[in-house]
Image: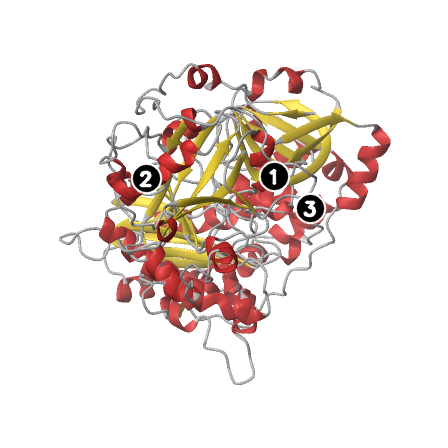
Amino acid sequence: MSRRSLPILAARLLAGAALSGCGGQSDAVSLPERCLQSGDAAPEFARQIGCMADFQALASVPLDANLPGARSVKVVQDHGDADALYFQNSALYPIHYEFVSTHLSGDPLPVVPQLAEFNATEYYSPERRFSLGAVTWYEEPQVWALELSPYDSASAEMIAALWRGVAADSYFGGSLYFHPTSESIAVEAERLPADVPVITTDQIYAEIDYQPLSLGAGMGRLRFLTAEQLADEYVSYQDILVLDEAPNDISVVQGLVTEEFQTPLSHVNVLSLNRKTPNMGLRGATGNAELRALEGKLIELTVDAAAWRVREVTEEEAAAYWEAHRPEPVTLPPLDLDVTELVDIEDVTPEPAAGESLREAIKTAVLAFGGKAAQYSILARTEGVPVAKAFAVPVFYYDQFMRDNGFYDRIDALLADPAFATDAALRDAELAALRADMVVAPLDGAFQATLKAKLAADYPGQKMRFRTSTNSEDLDGFPCAGCYESHTGDPADWSDVLDAIRETYATIWLFRTFEERSYYGIDHRSVGMALLVHPNFADEEANGVAVTANPFDPSGLDPAFYVNVQAGGDVEVVAPPAGVTSDQFLYFFSQPNQPRSYITHSSLIDAGETVLSVKQAYQLGVALDAIHRRFSPAYGPGAGNHGWYAMDVEFKFDDVADPSQPPALYVKQARPYPGRGD
């Protein structure tokens, strides 16, 4: 059965009370509740909405559904026809232009111009013919809200006139709020008259209990754990977990529910997307009666955009599901062990030769330098994308390290041991012992001399970051987000550099990473690690991740960048501590005035502040736009992918180049983003 939150605001709304911090409920006269539509076929539009059935007949999921459980009906107020109001069938006409050009153009009304002229006028001009908006019903908090497109520049007078028209022609008019969808609209909303109550995204978000992240279904045994317990508890691909908060990483499971809300770009969510397993946030999950009643039982968990469901299943159903949904074995690209030079990053992935695609050029570079370095090389040669000066250590030296110290033979013996294959605790212990020996094993003397000379010549006096770059990460098909761990070393103490390299190499054999490869049928001996090396980011003003398309709008009709950014460098946005939130916003970079629509705000800075300034957001937008276009020939429409395409980008604002200057943007990496599912 479906579970959504209780109507926690309904009593207050029906009583005419105000939400805490909101403008008071209005005295607007609304329609008496009486259904006005008849028949089975939904109308193309309505002039009034008299009941919930009328609303649902016209409603659709909003194009930009970044808050779950929402249904929306687009509205049009025609100032060229005595402010006539229309509620359009938003499933039949997903955008305003389609409706007005069909129903409100000519004979005897003015002719609606072509789309480009319409957009330039009707969202930005004070002389516009139409006011365009949407009425959204947020089911969990029981809120009716009038909303504009985030980039709409309507005045307070226009907003008030549209709100009053909607309120007068709908049965929910006495409970209707205005919801600003961007910073610029929020500023204009401060000028609204007192009879137009305002509700913020923060207030709506705080009252939502359900957060769908990776959509789909999975079957497994329901277990309740804490994120901290995952360090000592072994989980299986046959488990579905309920946790108090999102862990930094997790072995393959069939589904995940966290009590603390996650960010869409957290490591565990990207892993869930890659694995095509359901993932959701649910406030109060660890005490949820429906879930607790199924603890220890085999269940099916379904995560949809608007609701979640659970049901108990049989052993036979679960076994059949696991067999049908186990992924096809993945074969990693072979290592190129002929490259032994330390290569400046610009030269790692040469521009494609005649007849070669960018994707093929990246795949070729991966064989010697791994996915991260191969794609960083493209970034380093992309105008508008600032990256730190860097070079790459080829995979040859990891292979040499493993062979010289007999680690390959040791791994062969482990893989041949039946007990190692069947006992998770034994695997964990043996892999930990292997890593402990790797971090003290010697590195080749000639390699050390070459590396020391490179650092002294090109990076004098700088601490260096040694980042993982394998043939099994940051790739389309098997991104393995967060599988491996990077480390920092100071050449002033050479042993510190050696420790950083060995500790980085050893993360190939982390337990969770080993389990991930095993689930996908990967030959563990086929994995190799190159290193991407650049100066360490020591004094970060902000760290973040972004997606170069709107993950809440797979239709592509409402393009935006999704940005998740946190102040400083101590708290990563992909793995925040419990109770810590970051700035999450949609950045409509291609629209005039480039508005930002905030979903949540950082809990580490003062209320009313944002982590990024307008100038910093613009710098980031320039880079994201360039990255999206640059990698399209490899992963997007230029490569024949005409579905949803985006790049997952990590970035910093840091003063690594010149401490006397304001913190500057640096892009750390870019990889294909898998999307949140169907």
Nearer the viewer's eye, disc 1 or disc 3? 1
Query: CA–CA distance between discs 1 and 3?
Result: 48 Å
Mark positioned earlier in the residue sequence (1 or 2): 1
On-image quarter of the N terminus: top right
Whether pointer 1 and pointer 3 mark residues with C-beta atoms closer than 8 Å, the reply is no
Q: Give residue 161's mark.
A: 2
Q: Earlier in the sequence, mark 3 or mark 2?
A: 2
Judge the density around disc 2: few (<14), some (14-19), many (≥20) Cα neighbours within 10 Å: some
Report whether 136 appears left or right of 332.
left
Indicate the amino acid at tag 1.
Ala
Which element is circle 2 on?
helix
Name the kind of residue labelled 3 in the image.
Answer: Ser
Camera-nearest residue between 185 and 346? 185
Counting from the top left corner in percent of width and height, residue 469 is at: 49, 57
On the rendered structure, is 367 left or right of 657?
right
Q: CA distance from mark 3 to mark 2?
A: 61 Å
Q: Which residue does the numbered mark 1 point to in the structure image? A: 57
Find residue 600 and report its horizontal and vertical position in percent.
38, 35
Comes first in the chain, label 1 or label 3: 1
Q: Is residue 428 above or below residue 311?
A: below
In this rendering, position of residue 388 left or right of residue 405: left
- Secondary element under disc 3, as helix, strand or loop, is helix
Tag on residue 518? Answer: 3
What residue do we see at 59% from left, 51% from top?
92
The secondary structure type at the circle numbered 1 is: helix
